[in-house]
Image: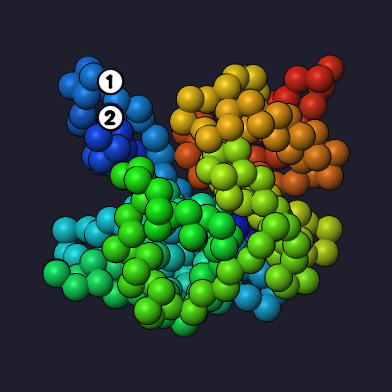
């Protein structure tokens, strides 16, 4: 199993929930008061029999109109058309924008040959949720054009890929565990978006159920350390991937 980090960049987010590119080398933090600064990085995983994309980023394009996500997949040595599964932890725009590619005034599927794997409750809730974090025009397009696989609760949909309904960040957020031989790769989505959130205990205001998210981070940290998981951190700043150690009840990501 091989894992590739597909870094889409760093962004500032203010109360409008608009993601604005931020270059630490040229931009100043003080010029964006009240903003949260986040990294956005989907992951590509090559399994023996399938090529898997985990979450899809914002779907932003470069100056030539090429999807940044596609560029990153090609840099990793693969063709975007060869993606077999797109695993979605949830459907907030910073995770789902790259499911489609905006070309001028039109929209195209970013991965026309892939199966998009989504929790049914997350999908249904996204159409009725009034939050600007959900872009229903994307979901409308997927509904008409994409191969969708709706899963419910927790389970396995291939021998190598299991999913767990966690809620916490959104009511129907899910995590993924990929297993091949003795290797285990865990994607916690926005329940475990950064290694720092494993090290520090806190309740985040941006979670649907912050206390449950905090408790889940503890549970996943214990499992990751005990079972030697490689953890993938979608919003990680210091690290995008890492192993977890637990010493005297405290976690360390290496």
Answer left or right for 185 relative to 34. right
Answer left or right for 56 relative to 54. left
Identify the residue at image location x=33%, y=72%.
Answer: 141
Measured along the vertical axis of the image, is residue 184 above or below residue 51?
above
Q: Nearer the viewer, residue 139 or 182?
A: 139
Provide residue 210's location: percent of width, then percent of height.
58, 28
Answer left or right for 136 relative to 173. left
Corner quadrant of residue 217: top right
Q: Which residue is mark 2?
A: 15
Provide residue 140's location: percent of width, then percent of height.
34, 69
Identify the residue at image location x=84%, y=44%.
Answer: 227
Provide residue 231's location: percent of width, then percent of height.
66, 44
Measured along the vertical axis of the image, is residue 51 above or below residue 192?
below
Characterize the local packing of mark 1: few (<14), some (14-19) or many (20 or more) Cα atoms within 10 angstroms.
few
Identify the residue at image location x=77%, y=40%.
Answer: 224
Q: Nearer the viewer, residue 129 or 76?
A: 129
Is the Cβ of the residue at disc 1 closer than 8 Å to that at disc 2?
yes
Query: Which residue extends farthest front?
Result: 128
């Amino acid at each position: 199993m091989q894992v590739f980090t597909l870094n889409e960049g760093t962004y500032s987010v203010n109360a409008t929930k608009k993601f604005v590119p931020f270059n630490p080398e040229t931009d100043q933090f003080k010029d964006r008061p009240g903003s949260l600064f986040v990294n956005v990085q989907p992951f590509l995983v090559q399994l023996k029999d399938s090529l898997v994309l985990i979450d899809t980023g914002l779907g932003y394009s470069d100056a030539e109109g090429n999807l940044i996500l596609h560029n990153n997949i090609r840099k990793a040595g693969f063709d975007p058309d060869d993606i077999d599964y797109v695993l979605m932890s949830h459907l907030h725009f910073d995770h789902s924008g790259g499911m489609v590619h905006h070309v001028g005034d039109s929209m195209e599927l970013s991965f026309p040959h892939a199966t998009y794997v989504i929790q049914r409750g997350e999908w249904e809730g996204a159409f009725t949720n009034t939050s600007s974090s959900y872009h229903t025009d994307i979901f409308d397009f997927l509904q008409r054009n994409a191969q969708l696989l709706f899963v419910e609760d927790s389970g396995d949909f291939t021998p190598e890929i299991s999913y767990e309904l966690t809620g916490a960040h959104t009511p129907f957020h899910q995590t993924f565990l990929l297993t091949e031989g003795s290797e285990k790769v865990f994607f916690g989505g926005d329940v475990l978006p950064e290694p720092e959130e494993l090290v520090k205990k806190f309740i985040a205001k941006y979670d649907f159920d912050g206390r449950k998210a905090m408790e889940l981070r503890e549970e996943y940290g214990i499992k990751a350390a005990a079972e030697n998981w490689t953890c993938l951190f979608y919003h990680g700043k210091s690290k995008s991937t890492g192993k977890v150690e637990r010493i005297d009840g405290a976690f360390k990501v290496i």
